[in-house]
Amino acid sequence: MKVSKSAVHWKARALPEIRFEDQQLTSFAGLVVFQPLFERLGLKSRLRGCFDHLTVSPIFGHASIVMLLIVHLLIGYRRLSDLRYYQDDPMVKRTLGLKRLPDVATVSRTLDGMDKTAVRELRRLSRSLVLERLKKHAPTRLTLDFDGSVIGTTRMAEGTADGYNKKKKGQRSYYPLFCTVAQTGQVLDVWHRPGNVHDSNGARAFILDCLNEIRKILPHVILEVRMDCAFFSEEIVHALDAPGIQYTISVLFERLTQLKRKVEKRLLWHCAAQDVKFFECYWKPDCWKETRRFIFIRTREPKQRKGPLQLNLFAPYEYGYQFKVILTNATLSARKLLALHNGRGAQEAIFAELKSQTQMDYIPCRRRAANQTWLLSAIMVHNLNRELQMSVEEPARCTTEQRAPWWSFVRLGTRRMRLIQRAGRLTTPKGRLTLTLSANPDVQAELLHYLRAAA
């Protein structure tokens, strides 16, 4: 439709008069789609069960404070002090089931009162929410990825230590170990650790615990485990072989001279894909008891140019070889095995979203239990965002060679921009509670889509 120029442009130069009134205006109208999700999961009542052992009974309660943290991270805030900027928002209050929000000091005191039992129960709740989704879908094959991620801090916090940090050397940090589910993109469990431990330090018990939890609800599922070279040890391999778990583990073969010699002396390489060749053999280190299947991968890649470039001259590519060795007990072909193992890179995208969108990399307190509560709240926000989409949509794909997620997930930052951070007004015409939003057809279609599915 063609419109006139005068119908488009508007000469508005005067500044409007500013008034602040107590009205039922909200900046987070999109929270209305999470309200039925919280009710369906019984989230607040289940949070109360995590803190039954705590004898202190403040007005708000520990469950309300943790619920506030979840909403705080969901709508995009980072610091606890940012609570002051939405404490009058009516949609936040309705989502939390509160008539008024606690102040920052109350939240800090409540977090300071957390103990190990509360953290253990909160961790169990976070894990159970993921297991319930897996039980509903009942897959025949499930892939778990294990890896650690550094959470640094500029302050002295309980349980932190100086550890490996290639970006900020000498920074005190935590180094939690994560278990993520490849098919749903959720964090199944996390083990909180100080920053000065190795990836595999005590990881065997954590890995077996996650596998046992899956076996309890899905006894006949085929389990796959993917790990990097930090977990390359006979102890972990034997623990995975005993229950019949399929695994792929990267091998830091530069430290094993015998593997280096095998690569150097190898003349015949089989083609797996374009510029990718392989060979395999059964071998064991001298200190191991049994031989295992090792896949040797050689990839032809262009070398990185680190010197200055002369733009007026032609600079051809220089190619070299990158080598990789994978330890596995799977019976897949080398091409499919390489695709399966390389799919574990999706876990890094989960870590990136946890740190950039749910503020997992923020250390709010000096107490370790309080920081663990914050970490678990950030994980639950990530999982709940995925759960919202999985509860209203069918899977977009089947199991792929890379074990990509079944759904094409929307990032939390995108969901905030499109849906959560929408202005609205709460009114009660003729005694009926009404949320009024701007007449944007795209927002209307997406919001009603979630509400209809929830109903």
Image: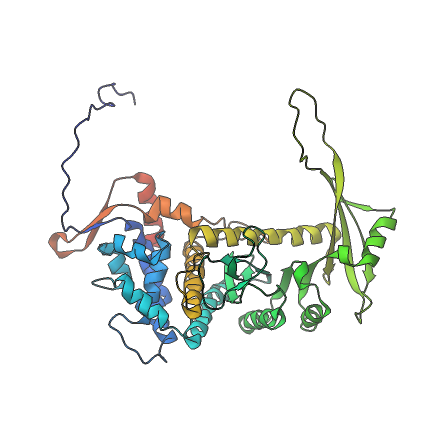
Q: Which residue is found at the position 22% from the left and 55% from the top?
A: 90
Place residue 144 in its image quadrant: bottom right
User: Camera-side residue: 345 or 109?
Assistant: 109
Give x and y (percent) for residue 10: 21, 24
Looking at the image, can residue 400 be seen? no
Report the colour scheme: rainbow
Query: Which residue occupies the foreground of this view, 392 or 151?
Result: 151
Find residue 184 and report its horizontal and vertical position in percent: 51, 57
Q: Quadrant of residue 225?
A: bottom right
Q: Residue at x 44, y 69 (%)?
A: 368
The answer to whether residue 6 is left or right of residue 374 is: left
Q: Residue at x 22, y 19 (%)?
A: 6
- Number of numbered tags placed on the structure image: 0
Q: Nearer the viewer, residue 124 or 197?
A: 197
Instruction: Note whether 125 is above or below 144 in the view shown.
Output: below
Relative image position of residue 313 (x, y in whole percent): 69, 21
Is residue 449 shown left or right of residue 350? Answer: left
Residue 329 horizontal side relative to residue 158, left or right: right
